[in-house]
Amino acid sequence: MSAPRAVNLLTNVARAAIALGVGGSALNASLFTVDGGHKAVLFDRFRGVLDETSGEGTHFLIPVLQKPYIFDVRTRPRSITSVTGTKDLQMVNLTLRVLSKPDPEQLPTIFKTLGIDYDERVLPSIGNEVLKAVVAQFNADQLLTERPHVSALVREALIKRARDFNLLLDDVAITHLSYGAEFSRAVEQKQVAQQEAERSKFVVAKAEQERRAAIVRAEGESEAAKLISEATAAAGSGLIELRRIEASREIASTLSKSRNVVYLPSGNNMLFGLNPSFANN
């Protein structure tokens, strides 16, 4: 009797374990968890995508019939690179930084029309579209001088365009702007030409100043010669002798202050002039 009882006991335990395992698996399949900053969209095999979304936490679903799709509704950065032409037909390389997120209330619509990878499908396309449309309104040099205005136009147009796809943009900014090699060479040549023009203006102005100085100097010398001529005519040769004496006095004063000047007596008897006794002998 003990053997059949043991067999029945083991059988009951096995049945209970199987029931618990099946029940635990069913319960686990009936639950799904949504992390913070995420939302879930349920797909039902009979009704399709449900209009209600599930927020953070643990939720129930019907196993096999329903499947959850998790969306990240936090703001995420993305860079969009575009090569576009300006109004004056210059090629420009632009990099746009976009902070985007899906509209949480429109997640079922986004899932139906775009899918899970909605940002890969939409943002590069509309980003290039808006950049080309805005940049084409400006010349190449205006993109630098009016960069805040260009960035504001891009932001406004891209935010409006993203709403058509139920996307919210928190910020849009142009982070990089560069020109093609031909335009860079043209800018460099223009700067060199401007520098040469400024240098030519300086040379012309300097020549003009020198010409005016020469004229003023010539007029002064002419006036001085006229005054000297009038004074000579009035005073005779006495003025000339006076000027000669003054010049001799200045020369003598300058020579007396120099250590390298030696005074020698006039005539041929230089040695006798040094010692008068030699002259007496």
Image: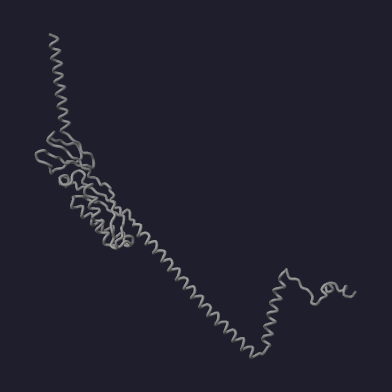
Q: Position of residue 204 (x, y in %)?
A: 46, 73
Residue 49 against residue 242 in the figure, above or below? above
Q: Which residue reaches farthest top?
A: 1
29 lies left or right of 155: left
Q: Position of residue 244 (x, y in %)?
A: 69, 82
Please give the count of numbered marks on the rendered protein: 0
Q: Residue at x 81, y 76 (%)?
A: 268
**Quadrant of the rendering where the C terminus is positioned:** bottom right
Q: Position of residue 29 (x, y in %)?
A: 16, 32
19 lies left or right of 76: left
- When asked about the image quadrant of residue 50, the answer is top left
120 lies left or right of 198: left
Q: Which residue reaches farthest bottom?
A: 234
Q: Position of residue 219 (x, y in %)?
A: 54, 82
**Observer-nearest residue: 66 or 16?**
66
Q: Which residue reaches farthest front?
A: 182
Residue 258 against residue 150 in the figure, above or below? below
Q: Which residue reaches farthest right?
A: 281
Q: Residue at x 43, y 66 (%)?
A: 195
**Quadrant of the rendering where the N terminus is positioned:** top left
Residue 272 against residue 179 in the figure, above or below? below
**Observer-nearest residue: 193 or 218?**
193
Report the colour scheme.
Answer: one colour
**Observer-nearest residue: 35 or 175?**
175
